Amino acid sequence: MTETQIIELEVKMRGITSISFLLLAPLGALAAPTASSNNVIPSRVLEPRAVVTPAPCQPQLNPPPTEQESAERFEKFAHAFLETKNLSEAFEYIDATYINHNPFASANGPNAALDALGPYWGSVQITPLRRTFKGEFGWLNYRTNYFGEIVDRYRMEGGCIVEHWDQGEKYPSF
């Protein structure tokens, strides 16, 4: 890679730090996913990968899930996201109304996040450090070969991830 390419990659990666997501918002309408004959929605990611856009998470609102049930769902998300790096599986836990609080994210929603992560997530070296869930919030703490140590915070509602923060987050000490 040239120095320019490395700098461009670092800029992209800083903007996305984990599930922070930018990219191609103006082209999103042109690249909208369509259902195939087997009801799997193909990813809008341009590189050929085994990533498909799953249907958005369907919140369970009546009755809402218990904290334990939400924690179990968060654990499944964390495992798919960090350990198996299976974005299709991880994104089954992301709500259609997902809000990304990263200031560099160009758009909210799971499609913007998948578009940002899909092209490179499989090549990122990830070392999970710890994770926890309390109340309606889950935290992931991990190290990557691109950014060093990262702390992501997620808010769940109805068993689905609805918000994400990663800029300046600290792992809780409770």
Image (cartoon, rainbow, N blue to C red):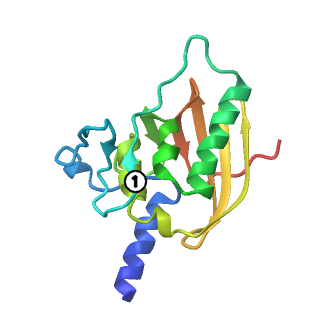
Q: Amino acid at mark 1?
A: Val
Residue annotated with mark 1: 51
Q: Give the residue at x 27% y 55%.
A: 24
Given residues 64 and 79, the one toward you in this image is: 79
Q: Is residue 21 left or right of residue 59?
A: left
* Identity of the residue furthest to the right in this view: 174
* Identity of the residue furthest to the top in this view: 62
Q: Is residue 146 left or right of residue 24?
A: right
List x then y, in percent, for residue 97.
Answer: 41, 31
Up-down relation of residue 10 to residue 32 (above or below): below
Quadrant of the drawing holding the C terminus: top right
Quadrant of the drawing holding the N terminus: bottom left
Q: Give the residue at x 55% y 46%.
A: 165
Quarter-of-image position of residue 60: top right
Q: Is residue 102 left or right of residue 47?
A: right
Q: Give the residue at x 66% y 30%.
A: 70
Q: Secondary structure at mark 1?
A: loop
Up-down relation of residue 129 to residue 88 (above or below): below
List x then y, in percent, for residue 55.
Answer: 39, 34
Q: Give the residue at x 41% y 49%.
A: 113
Up-down relation of residue 47 to residue 111 (above or below): below
Given residues 120 and 49, the one toward you in this image is: 49
Given residues 124 and 166, the one toward you in this image is: 124
List x then y, in percent, for residue 30.
Answer: 16, 47
Badge 1: few (under 14), some or many (20 or more) residues near its Cα, within 10 Å? many
